[in-house]
Protein backbone atom coordinates (compact mmCIF):
# COMPACT_ATOMS: atom_id res chain seq x y z
CA UNK A 1 0.00 0.00 0.00
CA UNK A 2 1.34 3.42 -0.94
CA UNK A 3 0.99 6.40 1.38
CA UNK A 4 -0.22 9.68 -0.05
CA UNK A 5 2.68 11.42 1.70
CA UNK A 6 5.61 10.10 -0.31
CA UNK A 7 8.48 12.58 -0.63
CA UNK A 8 9.26 12.93 -4.36
CA UNK A 9 13.03 13.00 -3.77
CA UNK A 10 13.42 10.20 -1.22
CA UNK A 11 10.52 8.10 -2.54
CA UNK A 12 9.45 7.33 1.02
CA UNK A 13 7.70 9.11 3.89
CA UNK A 14 10.90 10.81 5.05
CA UNK A 15 12.76 13.58 3.23
CA UNK A 16 16.33 12.99 2.10
CA UNK A 17 18.89 13.97 4.70
CA UNK A 18 20.94 17.00 3.72
CA UNK A 19 24.65 16.66 4.42
CA UNK A 20 24.88 20.24 5.73
CA UNK A 21 22.26 19.45 8.38
CA UNK A 22 24.46 16.75 9.92
CA UNK A 23 27.18 17.20 12.52
CA UNK A 24 30.74 16.22 11.50
CA UNK A 25 30.28 12.60 12.60
CA UNK A 26 27.03 12.37 10.66
CA UNK A 27 28.68 13.88 7.59
CA UNK A 28 31.49 11.31 7.80
CA UNK A 29 28.90 8.53 8.11
CA UNK A 30 27.04 9.85 5.07
CA UNK A 31 30.24 10.04 3.05
CA UNK A 32 31.08 6.42 3.89
CA UNK A 33 27.52 5.30 3.14
CA UNK A 34 27.67 6.86 -0.32
CA UNK A 35 31.13 5.47 -1.16
CA UNK A 36 30.38 2.92 -3.91
CA UNK A 37 33.17 0.64 -2.69
CA UNK A 38 31.84 0.35 0.87
CA UNK A 39 28.32 1.66 0.93
CA UNK A 40 24.83 0.77 -0.12
CA UNK A 41 23.69 -1.02 -3.25
CA UNK A 42 21.08 1.69 -3.81
CA UNK A 43 22.61 4.90 -2.44
CA UNK A 44 20.36 7.35 -0.63
CA UNK A 45 17.15 5.67 -1.76
CA UNK A 46 16.24 2.88 0.60
CA UNK A 47 17.56 1.88 3.99
CA UNK A 48 20.63 4.15 3.90
CA UNK A 49 18.56 7.26 3.28
CA UNK A 50 16.18 6.25 6.06
CA UNK A 51 18.87 5.32 8.59
CA UNK A 52 20.83 8.53 7.99
CA UNK A 53 18.10 10.34 9.95
CA UNK A 54 19.93 8.72 12.88
CA UNK A 55 23.58 8.66 11.72
CA UNK A 56 24.80 6.45 14.57
CA UNK A 57 22.29 3.77 13.59
CA UNK A 58 23.40 4.16 9.97
CA UNK A 59 27.04 3.87 11.00
CA UNK A 60 26.59 0.70 13.02
CA UNK A 61 24.21 -0.86 10.53
CA UNK A 62 26.65 -0.35 7.67
CA UNK A 63 29.53 -1.70 9.77
CA UNK A 64 27.60 -4.95 10.20
CA UNK A 65 26.81 -5.14 6.48
CA UNK A 66 30.50 -4.54 5.71
CA UNK A 67 31.42 -7.36 8.09
CA UNK A 68 29.22 -9.77 6.14
CA UNK A 69 30.67 -8.58 2.83
CA UNK A 70 34.31 -8.78 3.89
CA UNK A 71 34.76 -11.11 6.87
CA UNK A 72 31.89 -13.58 7.12
CA UNK A 73 32.59 -17.29 6.80
CA UNK A 74 29.52 -17.38 4.53
CA UNK A 75 30.23 -16.96 0.84
CA UNK A 76 28.38 -14.33 -1.23
CA UNK A 77 26.06 -16.89 -2.77
CA UNK A 78 24.87 -18.15 0.63
CA UNK A 79 24.44 -14.58 1.82
CA UNK A 80 22.33 -13.60 -1.17
CA UNK A 81 20.10 -16.69 -0.87
CA UNK A 82 19.59 -15.76 2.80
CA UNK A 83 18.74 -12.17 1.89
CA UNK A 84 16.28 -13.24 -0.82
CA UNK A 85 14.43 -15.69 1.44
CA UNK A 86 14.26 -12.95 4.07
CA UNK A 87 12.96 -10.40 1.56
CA UNK A 88 10.36 -12.87 0.28
CA UNK A 89 9.29 -13.90 3.77
CA UNK A 90 8.57 -10.24 4.51
CA UNK A 91 7.16 -9.40 1.06
CA UNK A 92 9.81 -6.69 0.76
CA UNK A 93 9.68 -5.70 -2.90
CA UNK A 94 12.39 -3.05 -2.48
CA UNK A 95 14.79 -5.48 -0.80
CA UNK A 96 14.07 -8.05 -3.50
CA UNK A 97 14.65 -5.52 -6.29
CA UNK A 98 18.05 -4.61 -4.80
CA UNK A 99 19.19 -8.18 -4.17
CA UNK A 100 17.83 -10.17 -7.11
CA UNK A 101 20.60 -8.76 -9.37
CA UNK A 102 23.19 -9.14 -6.58
CA UNK A 103 22.17 -12.79 -6.15
CA UNK A 104 22.55 -13.44 -9.87
CA UNK A 105 26.03 -11.83 -9.83
CA UNK A 106 26.93 -14.11 -6.90
CA UNK A 107 25.96 -17.17 -8.94
CA UNK A 108 22.56 -17.98 -7.46
CA UNK A 109 20.77 -20.02 -10.15
CA UNK A 110 17.44 -19.01 -11.66
CA UNK A 111 15.83 -22.16 -10.21
CA UNK A 112 16.70 -21.08 -6.66
CA UNK A 113 15.48 -17.52 -7.21
CA UNK A 114 12.24 -18.79 -8.74
CA UNK A 115 11.65 -21.25 -5.87
CA UNK A 116 12.08 -18.45 -3.34
CA UNK A 117 9.90 -16.00 -5.25
CA UNK A 118 7.12 -18.52 -5.91
CA UNK A 119 7.36 -20.14 -2.45
CA UNK A 120 7.89 -23.43 -4.28
CA UNK A 121 9.35 -26.66 -2.89
CA UNK A 122 13.13 -26.87 -2.68
CA UNK A 123 13.39 -30.35 -4.25
CA UNK A 124 16.14 -30.48 -6.86
CA UNK A 125 17.84 -27.26 -5.75
CA UNK A 126 21.47 -27.01 -4.69
CA UNK A 127 21.71 -28.51 -1.18
CA UNK A 128 23.01 -25.32 0.46
CA UNK A 129 20.39 -23.18 -1.27
CA UNK A 130 17.61 -25.55 -0.16
CA UNK A 131 18.92 -25.63 3.42
CA UNK A 132 19.03 -21.83 3.67
CA UNK A 133 15.56 -21.48 2.15
CA UNK A 134 14.09 -24.06 4.55
CA UNK A 135 15.83 -22.36 7.48
CA UNK A 136 14.39 -18.96 6.50
CA UNK A 137 10.92 -20.34 5.92
CA UNK A 138 10.82 -21.97 9.35
CA UNK A 139 12.39 -19.03 11.14
CA UNK A 140 10.05 -16.44 9.66
CA UNK A 141 7.00 -18.67 9.21
CA UNK A 142 7.04 -20.69 12.43
CA UNK A 143 9.31 -18.45 14.51
CA UNK A 144 11.14 -21.64 15.39
CA UNK A 145 13.62 -24.01 13.77
CA UNK A 146 12.91 -27.72 14.11
CA UNK A 147 15.71 -29.73 15.68
CA UNK A 148 16.39 -31.81 12.56
CA UNK A 149 16.78 -28.72 10.38
CA UNK A 150 18.88 -27.01 13.05
CA UNK A 151 21.17 -30.04 13.23
CA UNK A 152 21.61 -30.13 9.46
CA UNK A 153 22.34 -26.40 9.31
CA UNK A 154 24.80 -26.58 12.23
CA UNK A 155 26.59 -29.51 10.62
CA UNK A 156 26.85 -27.72 7.28
CA UNK A 157 27.75 -24.20 8.44
CA UNK A 158 29.26 -24.79 11.89
CA UNK A 159 28.32 -22.79 14.94
CA UNK A 160 29.92 -19.56 13.72
CA UNK A 161 28.45 -19.89 10.24
CA UNK A 162 24.97 -20.60 11.57
CA UNK A 163 25.13 -17.62 13.94
CA UNK A 164 26.25 -15.42 11.05
CA UNK A 165 23.54 -16.82 8.76
CA UNK A 166 20.71 -16.23 11.24
CA UNK A 167 22.14 -12.82 12.18
CA UNK A 168 22.25 -11.84 8.49
CA UNK A 169 18.61 -12.88 8.09
CA UNK A 170 17.70 -10.89 11.21
CA UNK A 171 19.54 -7.83 9.88
CA UNK A 172 17.63 -7.94 6.60
CA UNK A 173 14.33 -8.69 8.35
CA UNK A 174 14.88 -5.47 10.29
CA UNK A 175 15.62 -3.68 7.03
CA UNK A 176 12.41 -5.05 5.52
CA UNK A 177 10.42 -3.62 8.44
CA UNK A 178 12.24 -0.29 8.17
CA UNK A 179 11.35 -0.08 4.46
CA UNK A 180 7.73 -0.99 5.21
CA UNK A 181 7.32 1.54 8.03
CA UNK A 182 8.54 4.40 5.86
CA UNK A 183 6.70 3.13 2.75
CA UNK A 184 9.80 2.95 0.56
CA UNK A 185 8.76 2.88 -3.08
CA UNK A 186 10.39 0.73 -5.73
CA UNK A 187 13.07 2.39 -7.86
CA UNK A 188 11.92 3.87 -11.15
CA UNK A 189 11.43 1.19 -13.79
CA UNK A 190 11.02 -1.65 -11.27
CA UNK A 191 7.71 -3.47 -11.00
CA UNK A 192 6.42 -5.54 -8.09
CA UNK A 193 7.12 -9.24 -8.57
CA UNK A 194 5.56 -10.81 -5.50
CA UNK A 195 2.08 -12.20 -5.42
CA UNK A 196 0.65 -13.53 -2.21
Image: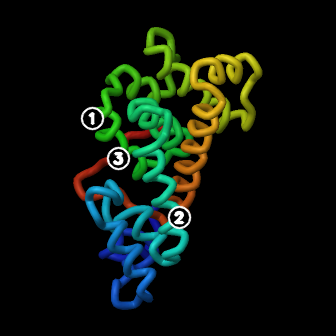
**Residue 94 image point, x, y percent:** 40, 52
Q: How many marks?
A: 3
Type of colouring: rainbow
**Residue 26 as seen in the image, left or right of residue 169:** left
**Residue 122 as seen in the image, left or right of residue 193:** right
**Residue 116 image point, x, y percent:** 46, 29
Residue 26: mark: none
Residue at far left of view: 189
Whether residues under marks 3 and 2 lie with C-beta atoms below 8 angstroms apart, the answer is: no
Residue under numbered circle 3: 97
Q: Nearer the viewer, residue 80 or 143?
A: 80
Asked if residue 85 is positioned above or below residue 189 in the image, the reply reads above
Q: Closer to the camera: disc 1 or disc 2?
A: 2
Q: Earlier in the sequence, mark 1 or mark 2?
A: 2
Q: Earlier in the sequence, mark 3 or mark 2?
A: 2
> Within 10 angstroms of label 1, few (less than 14), some, or many (20 or more) residues?
few
Task: Classify mark 3: helix, strand or loop.
Answer: helix
**Is residue 117 in view from this perspective?**
no
Residue under numbered circle 1: 105
**Residue 125 image point, x, y percent:** 44, 14
Q: CA distance from mark 3 to mark 1?
A: 13 Å
**Residue 175 as seen in the image, left or right of residue 110:** right
Q: Quadrant of residue 185 in the image?
A: bottom left
Q: Closer to the camera: disc 3 or disc 2?
A: 2
Residue under numbered circle 2: 60
Give the residue drawn at x 48%, y 33%.
74
Whether residues under marks 3 and 1 lie with C-beta atoms below 8 angstroms apart, the answer is: no
Give the residue drawn at x 36%, y 66%.
33
Amino acid sequence: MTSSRIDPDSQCRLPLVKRDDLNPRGQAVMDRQLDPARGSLVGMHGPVGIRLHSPVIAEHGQALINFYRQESVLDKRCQEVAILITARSHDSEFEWAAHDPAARRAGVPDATIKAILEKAPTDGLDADDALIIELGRQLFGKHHIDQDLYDRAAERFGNRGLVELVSLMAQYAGTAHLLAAFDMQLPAGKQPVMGS
